Image (cartoon, helix red, strand yellow):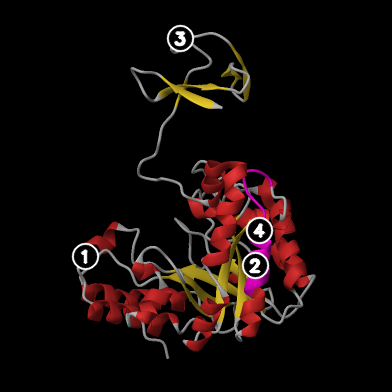
């Protein structure tokens, strides 16, 4: 297909199919590639308005594989899997006192080696490699379903097609099938520690009742294959009560609640000083964690945090204080914590870089 833009208004486009004709909207829910007319009038069914969201450029695996296409994408992804994380990285983690890795996967991994387009095969082999490397180096693995079909939050890391959150009741059965696939494949692997059923569902787009229904079915899918692995339930982001899953999870065995704590993504943090950021961790974040930590309830897991903030020009000593505060507080989580990420293009999001450059000190 080819996108033809209007010279006078670049947002007005026509989409030409391989047969030489243009896509036209024949109804509110149907497009056909059979329009042979011309013109850019408002009532022309082959004229569309294309808006590029400059403030939310999507760079997820859907966009990557779709952009490279079926000829190039398999090699691009395979080169990435071969080089981004190797067994040396698992050895590094082990030598620095860490005992587990949280590995994000997409729903299409259950269809490997021939996932639906535009995704390409190979992610399952990469996950198999990770389990082997973890076992070789005395590490455990948390398999995290980071991207579900339909997208649970509209972000690129959830493999959203166009920035929308579409996951709901109609997706539950297929999503449970992915969990069942992962649990059955790794249930007897000595490195398996936990299966996380969904990463960062967004409220109110993801309805709480639907989420609980899914979590119950996903929990049962894991338990069908293993009684020892933990099942992790991620709290909803957005306008949601941090304690909304506690009573539900209290009736389940070997579960943990995942909370994500970032000192970003809110205007409140933009005016914070170094000391205010550190105090916020020791006071507010400690209180937030205490609120979801109960004596007889599910364990708590700070599944994502990072030593980055809205401060420019901070010294290494400032970063060390900020990181130490988070390790001190998040170390109280009864299931532990995970840094996002092990490797990243941004230094302070890169745990390996932070350790090697003495920004983070682990016991």
For residue 197, above or below residue 317: above
Of the two numbered discs 3 and 1 in the rendering, the one whose residue sits closer to the viewer: 3
Residue pointed to by mark 2: 127
What is the magenta range? 116-130
Mark 1 residue element? loop
**Nearer-the-camera pick, 27 or 55:** 55
What is the C-alpha distance between the residues marked 2 and 3? Answer: 51 Å
Q: Residues within 10 Å of mark 1 (few under 14, many from 20)?
A: few
Outermost residue to the bottom: 363
What is the C-alpha distance between the residues marked 1 and 2? Answer: 37 Å
For residue 270, above or below residue 129: above
User: Picture coordinates of residue 175 (x, y %)?
Assistant: 69, 55
Residue pointed to by mark 1: 312
Q: Is 334 placed left or right of 192 in the picture?
A: left
User: Picture coordinates of residue 75 (x, y %)?
Assistant: 59, 53
Q: Residues within 10 Å of mark 4 (few under 14, many from 20)?
A: some
Name the quadrant containing residue 109.
bottom right
Of the two numbered discs 2 and 4 in the rendering, the one whose residue sits closer to the viewer: 4
Residue pointed to by mark 3: 39
Residue 345 makes an appearance in the image: yes
The residue drawn where x is 67% and y is 80% is 191
Residue pointed to by mark 4: 122
What is the C-alpha distance between the residues marked 3 and 1? Answer: 51 Å
What is the C-alpha distance between the residues marked 3 and 4? Answer: 45 Å
Of the two numbered discs 3 and 4 in the rendering, the one whose residue sits closer to the viewer: 4
- Tag count: 4
What is the C-alpha distance between the residues marked 1 and 4? Answer: 39 Å
Residue 194 makes an appearance in the image: no
Q: Is 330 placed left or right of 283 in the picture?
A: right
Upstream in sequence: badge 1 or badge 4: 4
């Amino acid at each position: 297909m080819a996108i033809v833009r209007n010279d006078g208004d670049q947002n007005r486009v026509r989409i030409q199919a391989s047969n030489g004709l243009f896509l036209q909207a024949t109804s509110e829910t149907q497009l056909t590639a059979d329009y042979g007319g011309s013109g850019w009038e408002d009532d022309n069914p082959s004229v569309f308005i294309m808006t590029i969201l400059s403030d939310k450029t999507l760079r997820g695996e859907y966009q990557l594989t779709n952009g490279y296409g079926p000829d190039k994408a398999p090699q691009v992804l395979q080169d990435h899997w071969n080089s981004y994380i190797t067994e040396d990285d698992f050895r590094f983690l082990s030598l620095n006192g860490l005992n587990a890795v949280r590995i994000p996967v997409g729903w299409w991994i259950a269809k490997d080696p021939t996932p639906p387009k535009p995704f390409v095969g190979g992610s399952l082999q990469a996950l198999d490699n990770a389990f082997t490397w973890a076992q070789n180096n005395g590490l455990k693995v948390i398999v995290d379903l980071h991207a579900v079909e339909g997208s649970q939050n509209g972000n690129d890391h959830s493999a959203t097609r166009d920035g929308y959150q579409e996951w709901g009741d109609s997706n539950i059965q297929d999503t449970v099938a992915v969990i069942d696939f992962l649990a059955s494949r790794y249930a007897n692997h000595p490195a398996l520690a936990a299966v996380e059923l969904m990463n960062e569902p967004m409220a109110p787009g993801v309805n709480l009742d639907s989420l609980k229904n899914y979590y119950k079915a996903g929990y049962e899918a894991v338990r069908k294959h293993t009684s020892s692995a933990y099942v992790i339930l991620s709290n909803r982001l957005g306008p949601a009560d941090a304690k909304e899953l506690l009573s539900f999870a209290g009736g389940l065995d070997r579960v943990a609640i995942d909370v994500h704590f970032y000192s970003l993504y809110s205007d409140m943090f933009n005016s914070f000083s170094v000391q205010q950021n550190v105090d916020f961790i020791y006071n507010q974040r400690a209180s937030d964690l205490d609120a979801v930590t109960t004596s007889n309830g599910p364990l708590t897991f700070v599944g994502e945090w990072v030593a980055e903030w809205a401060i420019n020009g901070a010294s290494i000593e400032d970063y060390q204080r900020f990181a130490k505060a988070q390790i001190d507080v998040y170390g109280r989580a009864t299931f532990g914590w995970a840094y996002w990420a092990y490797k990243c293009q941004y230094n302070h999001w890169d745990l390996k870089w932070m350790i090697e450059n003495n920004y983070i000190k682990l016991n």
